[in-house]
Image (cartoon, helix red, strand yellow):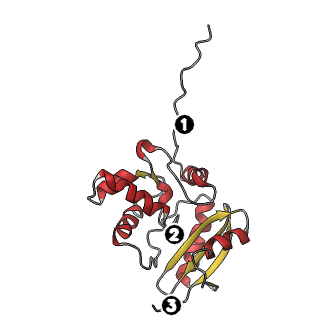
Amino acid sequence: MNERTQNYLIFETAGGFCGIAWSDVGVLRFQLPTKDAAATERLLLRRLSNAQPGTPTPEVAEAVAKVKRYFAGEEIDFSGVTLDLGEQDAFFRQIYDAARQVGWGHTTTYGTLAKQLGAGPEAARDVGQAMAKNPVALIIPCHRVLAAGGKIGGFSAPGGSNAKARMLELEGVQLAPPKPVQQSLGF
């Protein structure tokens, strides 16, 4: 296999330190923010052991600027960022393409995405697996894909489902709190 050059950059945003890695094809990996640059770098390099620090291409520099604006609360569309998804499974690529159509402040569910791709409800689990393995979280907005009934579902990024909820709140999505169980009548 021909090894492509892989470079990366760790950078600070209002949400913490993010990491982005790219090849000559496009963005390979994106690391959601942590509070520590070294932790972000470790997480990013866990799956890209050959990547070297590098100077971003103009397109990667633009993606970095968009990420900074996103975490500052600005409405950003990442659908134009060129990705290098390598040897991803064809169905996962379809799932990622569909997820990239879910815009700022909107959500969908695993089942709805499966149905949109012409697959049955049993494929919702495949959609969930694809989201869990998303190499470029935020750029492929897996945080906008919820479990059935609009429940937050899982999130494999640092901070788990709390990070997912914070990103959705940043976009103005109000996740309904669970309905209270029986209220006291106060007699």
Q: In which quadrant will I find the N terminus?
A: bottom left
Q: Amino acid at mark 1?
A: Pro
Q: Residue at x 64, y 78 (%)?
A: 9
Name the residue tied to disc 1. 177
Of badges 3 and 1, the one in the foreground is 3
Quadrant in the picture for residue 17: bottom right
Q: Amino acid under label 3?
A: Glu
Q: Nearer the viewer, residue 164 or 134?
A: 134
Residue farthest toward the left in the current orientation of the protein: 118
Mark 3 neighbour density, 10 Å: few (under 14) some (14–19) many (20 or more): few
Q: Secondary structure at mark 1?
A: loop
Q: Is residue 87 left or right of residue 118?
A: right
- Labels 2 and 3: the sequence-earlier one: 3
Count the marks. 3
Q: Residues within 10 Å of mark 2 (few under 14, many from 20)?
A: many
Residue 99 is situated, as x and y percent measured from the top left of the image, at 41, 61
Contact, CB < 8 Å: mark 1 with mark 2? no
Q: Is residue 27 above or below residue 14?
A: below
Q: Which residue is mark 3?
A: 3
Label placed on residue 78: none
* Residue at image point 48% right, 44% down: 151
Whichever of callouts 3 and 1 sits on the residue coming sooner in the sequence is 3
Q: Secondary structure at mark 2?
A: loop
CA–CA distance between discs 3 and 1?
Answer: 48 Å
What distance separates the C-alpha of mark 1 from that of mark 2?
A: 29 Å
- Measured as percent of width and height from the top left, residue 86 is found at 44, 79
Cα separation between marks 2 and 3: 20 Å
What x and y, as percent, mark residue 107?
44, 51
For marks 1 and 2, the one nearer the N-term is 2
Q: Which residue is mark 2?
A: 136
Q: Residue at x 50, y 90 (%)?
A: 3
Rendered residue at 54%/74% (across/down): 29
